[in-house]
Amino acid sequence: MQRLLSVVVLSCLSWMAFAQDGGAPAPAAPAPASAASPEPASPGAAPSAADAPAAPAPSQDPPAPPPPGALSNEWVQALFAVESDPEPKELAAGVHFPTSNEIRFFLWKNAIQDLGGILIGVGTDQNYFMAGWAKPELLILFDFDQLVVDLHLIYRAAFSVAKDPKEFLGLWSKKKAKSFAAALEASLTDPGQKKRILAEFKEWRRPIEIRLHNQLKFNRENKIKSFLDDPEQYETLARLFAERRVLAVRGDLTAKKTMRQIGELAKRMKLPVRVLYLSNAERYFPFSEDFRANMAALPFDEKSLVLRTTGLGSWKNGDPFYYVIQKSQQFLEWLKDPSIQHVKQLIRHIVPQKERFLYVIDRLPPTEEEKKRPAKPPRGIKGAKQAAQNLSPPPPAAAP
């Protein structure tokens, strides 16, 4: 326990030194935050979206692009100035998702391996697995559920004090719960936030422990290494936190603020968004103008991918989800078509790959002639194969 506390205290002292050197006074302790980051909030009040210029003048920008290693104080301030969107009136499906219920996201591993750039992902633990494979230069954990954002602060503490995967897994055990809670408490400064997050840790520690062990077992059965059993991947994640390259923020894919500020920051940093992981979030909203604008604000390049899941499967078949890959620039072309109103219109064109449960969308939006043809979302692998045969022209069989 003393070792855990000492590591966290050193981390806090390092942050205090940053606050003193940053040239801005530290703010008074805030009320429970609407957004959190895996580093304490940056010093000074974040500018409001209404007051801030759409694009800061070049002379105001921190040096770009950020060099390897720890982010400079200027870039840290810019990163943690990203504002949260308003709190949602209700949650998707009306429930929290403190752990992922997706198990075969390793199907994306080959496609995202060593992509670098920025990884933006919704949800919790699945993002750490993907970041271990993609090795991003910046990890942005984006979700509109404040609980999910809070849980990333708990993960931050775990990555800060555990030296390797075995120790990391041990922190979630009942045996280590008391000492880990003490280390977590030492990593938080705001009393309201501290009380809330410690209560969340107490409630969700055991489900997270079960989830991590189950996913580790499942990955091993499929001969997949992850940050839970690969020291190199674990070091990748621990280094991202240590170098202040991780941000967790409460954001809404259909709102006007957070995602666009992330896009503007990415452009200033001259870093492409290489992985955008949406899970199945798109099923809960239509493709509004704000959603289209948010996607268009992100700097994608030819290597960038959108990853999503769709619930067309069944546990009877081994998994309730299909795992879908699409080139990001291609996705933007779909969004330019005003007749494309919902993700289900894309899912009609998924094409099965060699690996079971893996699918690809690799085509532009349907032509006017194709739109006249009746189409239904494919059900099961047989239906997806039939949908692939109906496409004109047929997409390539290989994943991008």
Image (tube, rainbow, N blue to C red):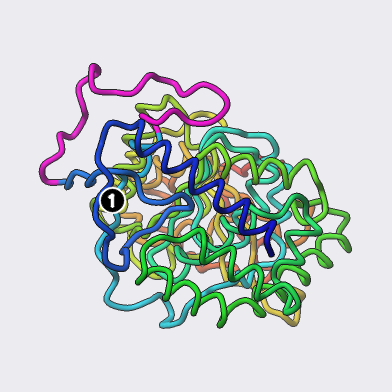
Which residue in the rendered view is the most extreme toward the left? 51
- In the image, what residue type sits under mark 1? Glu
Give the quadrant of residue 248: bottom left
Please indicate, yes or no, whether residue 223 appears anywhere in the rendered image: yes
Q: Position of residue 174 (x, y in %)?
A: 72, 79
Quadrant containing the C terminus is top right
User: Measuring 33% from the left and 32% from the top, which residue is drawn there?
Assistant: 22
Please indicate, yes or no, whether residue 389 appears anywhere in the rendered image: no
Q: Position of residue 340 (x, y in %)?
A: 35, 55
Q: Residues within 10 Å of mark 1 (few under 14, many from 20)?
A: many
User: Measuring 75% from the left and 82% from the top, which residue is drawn there?
Assistant: 316
Residue designated by label 1: 83
Q: Position of residue 367 (x, y in %)?
A: 41, 45
Magenta highlight range: 50-75
Q: Is residue 164 left or right of residue 97?
A: right
Between 221 and 183, the residue placed more toward the observer is: 183
Q: Is residue 311 above or below residue 40?
A: below
Between 12 and 241, the residue placed more toward the observer is: 12
Q: Is residue 243 left or right of residue 60?
A: right
User: Measuring 40% from the left and 46% from the top, which residue is drawn there?
Assistant: 334
Q: Is residue 268 above or below residue 146?
A: above
